[in-house]
Image: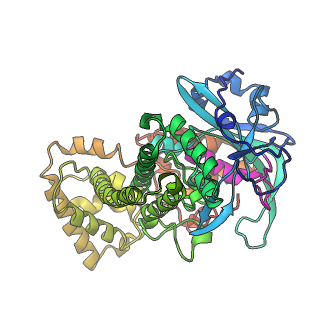
Amino acid sequence: MNLNIKDIFNKKLPADPILENTRRQVAKACFSYVQPKQTLKPELLHASPEMLENLGLSKADSNSEDFLKVFTGNQVYQNTKPYAMCYGGHQFGNWAGQLGDGRAINLFEVEHKNKTWQVQLKGAGETPYSRTADGLAVLRSSIREYLCSEAMFHLGVPTTRALSLSLSGNQVMRDVMYNGNSAYEKGAIVCRTAESFLRFGSYQILASRQDNKTLKTLVDYTIRHHFSQLGTPSKETYIAFFKKVSERTLNMIIHWQRVGFVHGVMNTDNMSILGLTIDYGPYGWLEGYDYGWTPNTTDRQHKRYRFGNQANIGLWNLLQLANAIYPLIEEANPLEAILNQYKTDFELKLLSMMRAKLGLHNEDENDQKFILELKDILHQTETDMTIFFRNLSNFKKENPQEGLQVVKDAFYKPEEIVGDLESRWTNWFKSYAKRLGTESGGDEDRRKKMNTVNPKYVLRNYMAQLAIDDADKGDYKLIDQLFNMLKKPYNEQPEYQQWFAKRPEWARHKVGCSMLSCSS
C-alpha cells in the first residue's frame, strides 16, 4: 500500500509543544500530536471503491493487513505524525470554550491527481480535547456517518467523504438517550476524508484568547491552501475570504433544504470553513414535510436547529466567524455587507431551488406566492417530502384533476384529504397546470429535469437503523446494499423499489428512527 503523503497542516501551523496525551487547555497552537489507540481485534466491514481510487489505492490494497492496521489506528503510516485539531465553538447558541477533536485523529494528507485529502479516523481514542469522554465511537453512529456522507456526495450536496468502516473489536459503554440506561455496544472506527476539516471554531478559539498572531497564521494558511484564487493574504483578501465562506455555507444549506436533510447540531464547531456538511451526528431526513422538525432529542424543547431554521443558523454562525476574524480587518462594514447579502441571496436561491423542484425554469412574479401556498398545504397533513416531489414529476398539465392521484402515495393519512384541504389541493394543481403552460418543453422533458433535483432514494432514518440492527447481529449485507443504492439516488433503480416508501409506522417513535441523540 503506497500513499503519496503531502502533509501540510501539521508542518505549516504551530503545534502544541506538550506531547503527553492528557486533557488540557491548548494555547497558541492549532493542533496536538497524538497516537491512535490500539484496538483488540480490528475488522474491516466496508470500504468505498470511489474513495479508494481518490486516494490512489486499489481494491487489493483495501484487503491488505497494512490497510486494516493503518485505517483503524493500529499502525502509524511511515513518516507521518497523527494529530488532533484545536477549536472552540458555540453550542446551541452558547460559547463553550475549547472543544477540539475529542475523538477524531488526523492521520495524514494525501495528494492524488492534483487533489489533496486530509485523512482522519473517528473513534480512534483519546486526545487532549476529549474532556470527560473516551474518544471512542460505536458501530451505530459509525454506520450512520459512513453511509450518509457518501449518500450526500451522490445527492450533489457538499460534504466530507468516508473511506472505510471498521469494527475495533472493543466494547464501548454508551447511554443512547442520556437517560441513565448505559450499555455496552460494538466499538467502531470510520475513516473520513475531506480537503480540510477546519471549522468556524478553529478561528473562534484563537480570537477568544486574543491570540491574533496565531489567528493570522491560520487565516493566511487557509487562504493560501484552500482559497488560493483570492491572492496574497491582506485586509482585502480577508474580506473576500469571508465572502467565499458565506457563499459556500449558503450553497450547502440550500442543498440541505432541497433534499430534506436536517443536520441536527449546527454548532459553530460543526461548521466547515469550506462549506462542507461535516460531523454526521443526530441528523435526520424529513419524512413528513415539516419546517419545525428536528431529529435531535437534545434540541427537542427549543428546536434551534429545526429544518426551517437552518439558513438562519447559518447566518448566525457566520456572524460568529465574522467576529472571530474582525481583529485582522478592524472594519465592520464590509463584513456586515456580506452578512446582509447572505439574507438577500438566501431568498433568491431558495426560490430558484423550489422552481427547479417544481420543474419551472422561467421566472414569474407570482411564483413566491404560489410556492408559499404549496408549502402551507404540505403542512396541513403529514406528507412525505421525498415521495411527493419525486412523484410530482409524473403530473400532466393537461389533467390537473388527476394531481391528487399522482401524489397520493406521499400522504400518511390520505383520509384527511377532504373538504377544504381537498379544495386547496385541487386549486393548487389547477394553478400548477396553468403555470406549466407558460414553460417551453413537454411533460416528459420536465419529468426528466425534475428527477435530477428530486431524489428517489435518501437515507431515511429507519433504513439506517435496520442496517444497524442487522450489523449488531453480525450481518453487514444491508450496509452494502444501501451504500450501492445511494450511489444513484436520482435513478429509478427498480431493484430497490422497496426503499421508495413512506416511513413504516413501527419507526414513528423508535429510537434511531425518529429520536436521536449526540451519544455516539
Is residue 173 one of those drawn in magenta? no
Of the 4 image quadrants, the one containing the C terminus is bottom right
Vertical order, 318 against 53 (above or below) = below
Q: Residue 292: x percent and y percent?
A: 45, 71
Q: Residue 369: x percent and y percent?
A: 22, 67
Horizontal arrangement in the rendering, residue 32 relative to residue 490 (left or right): right
Q: Residue 8: x percent and y percent?
A: 64, 32
Residue at position x 76%, y 65% in the image: 175
Of the 4 image quadrants, the one containing the N terminus is top right
Image quadrant assignment for residue 71 = top right
Question: 165 and 310: which one is in front?
Answer: 310
Residue at position x 54%, y 35% in the image: 225
Image quadrant assignment for residue 48 = top right
Question: 417 and 108: which one is in front?
Answer: 108
Q: Can residue 429 be seen in this view?
A: yes
* Range of residues picked out in magenta: 125-149
Residue at position x 70%, y 68% in the image: 177
Vertical order, 261 against 54 (above or below) = below
Residue at position x 29%, y 60% in the image: 405
Is residue 143 one of those drawn in magenta? yes
Horizontal arrangement in the rendering, residue 119 relative to residue 457 (left or right): right
Tell me how many marks there are.
Answer: 0
Question: 467 and 127: which one is in front?
Answer: 127
Q: Residue 201: x percent and y percent?
A: 60, 55
- Rendered image coloring scheme: rainbow
Q: Can residue 399 be seen in this view?
A: no
